[in-house]
Image (tube, rainbow, N blue to C red):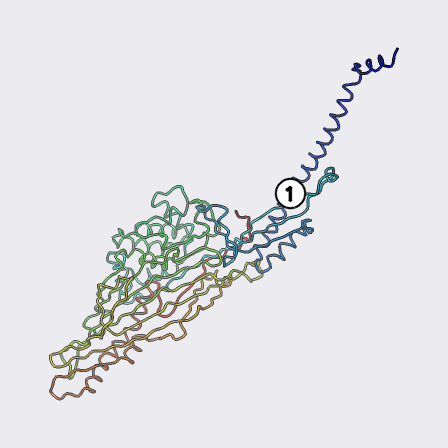
Amino acid sequence: MSTASLARRAASAEDGAIAIVMALFLMVCVSLSAIAIDMGSLYLERRTAQGAADLAAMAAAADLDRAEEAARATLAANGMGDVRALSVVKGRYEGDGAVAPDLRFVAGREPYNAVRLDMARSGQLYFAKSFMAEPEISVSALGAADAQATFSIGSRLASPKDGLLNTLLGSLLGGKVSLSAMDYNALADAQISLDSFLSALAAEIDLTGGTYSALLNSDVRVDNVLDAIVKAATSGGDMQAAHAAATLASQIAGTATVPLNTLVDLGPLANAAVGQPQAGLAAEVSVMSLLSAAAVAANGANQVAVNLDGSIPGLLSLRLDLAIGEAAQHSGWVAIGQQGATVRTAQTRLRLVAEVGGTGLLAGVRVRLPLYVEIAGAEARLAGLTCGPVQGGNREAVIEAQPAVVKAWIGDVAPGGLSSFGTSVPVSNASVVQAPLISVSASAFAQMTNAAATELRFSQSDIDAHVVKTAKVHDHLSSLVSSLLQTANLNVNVLGLGLNVSAIKALVLSLLSPVVSALDPLVASLLKSIGVGLGEVDVQVNGLRCGGAVLAG
């Protein structure tokens, strides 16, 4: 057989072709399997890295002062000490469902409550490293501190002596209030949980589903608020407080409405479902302070006029005009929040006119003392939280309290303009005496203010004991009205008769001095009953929740 024939026969032979194809196919399969193994390994590495990054972000958020150090230690403890790059950025996270997830964390915004961690490390290749470089595995995690405090800015109980508190509550709520001193003491001593109160209130307005945000964005009637207080006090076993609140509910019209967001700011818990147990809502609040805040918030007309005749013996008349501004936005009387949360009181204006009968040269003449007081909103800000173990006794909340600026005058103002909080109220010289031959005018001004906030520290034992702490202005005037009278400028105008001007001044001061000594405690008591203190602010931390840190996003 010729060589050409052998070549043609070999070329046309098909024996072993399948073996060659299979060999080539196996080579491809083995290569793909090797790549698949590497890809699976890289995916597992990424999941492991993500888990370590999550833990590191939470550790950093739980220790913001040592955020990067805590993150590196956590990564090393989880076998990730060989990271190629690590970025730990502190900022502020707001878990608002209405905000897009990628916008909820703002890097660099203070006060810090969260950490964004970005980490990169080399991936491990086993088969593919012969023909490609090892890839980089990048992961991110967002950790947020979960420590929260419940705190309130409120009033101490004003004395119900002579029915003063009954008169004021009746004017604010609409009705004739006649609670006894025993009733007020029961309300002042009572504490109810926010959870019980809000759950009862949701049931009162038939809100059986939805979130607390929907509840707090509602306007409810005062009688609903009082009924919820009765139910919460009853469920807590305080029947005396429940009875006092029920008595008050029966004595008022109950038609005034209360914007709930001026009473309670739930902060990060606002989006929780109504009725679902929440640790932060277990905090207890004062029933009397809650009633006081509700009465102020229910004052829809923003101004009330109260006749206080008989409150101070010896006076011919005593009339009060009180105007209460709207509470600041995003500020309730009680708030649940993290560091930076704030509560404020509303701006308040008070006009008080007292009249007393004259004697001697002023016999038969009415001597009047018009007093006008402007009080700005006081503020309490959660400045810090320490979440050590309860047994260690080092849990603490730090509140920065800023007492309101107080301005006071002896002078005449138009009572109808007190509620125009967008404009200032003109104060003119007061007409103290107006007789056919004698007229006396007076003017005086005093101010109390602080340049900086006062730091108040609440330990866990303070919180458990419902301790109320007070920040006062440094130049506090303990006797505001008396101080005004002592510095008053009196102008006497006498028409003939050769009367002694100095004697008339001395007579006016002698007539008014007993009045102002009685007006000082009266003004203080009036303001305390609506949660306002002259040159001071009361703060209470109602609860402290230390939950470490959580993943956010």
Q: Is residue 59 left or right of residue 289?
A: right
Q: Is residue 528 left or right of residue 123?
A: left
Residue 395 locus on image (x, y percent): 54, 61
Q: Is residue 316 left or right of residue 8?
A: left
Answer with the quarter of the image where residue 333 lies.
Answer: bottom left
Query: In the image shown, does 85 or 398 lie closer to the viewer?
Result: 85
Residue at horizontal 40%, vertical 48%? 213
Helix, strand or loop for disc 1: helix
**Callout 1 crowding tier (Cα within 10 Å): few <14, some 14–19, many ≥20:** some
Residue extending farthest right: 1
- Name the residue that disc number 1 marks: 46
Answer with the quarter of the image where residue 17 lies.
Answer: top right
Q: How many marks?
A: 1
Residue 82 locus on image (x, y percent): 69, 51
Residue extending farthest top: 1
Residue type at numbered disc 1: Arg
Query: In the image shown, does 262 or 90 lie closer to the viewer?
Result: 90
Query: In the image shown, does 71 or 406 lie closer to the viewer?
Result: 71
Residue 288 locus on image (x, y percent): 36, 59
Q: Is residue 437 above or below residue 150?
A: below
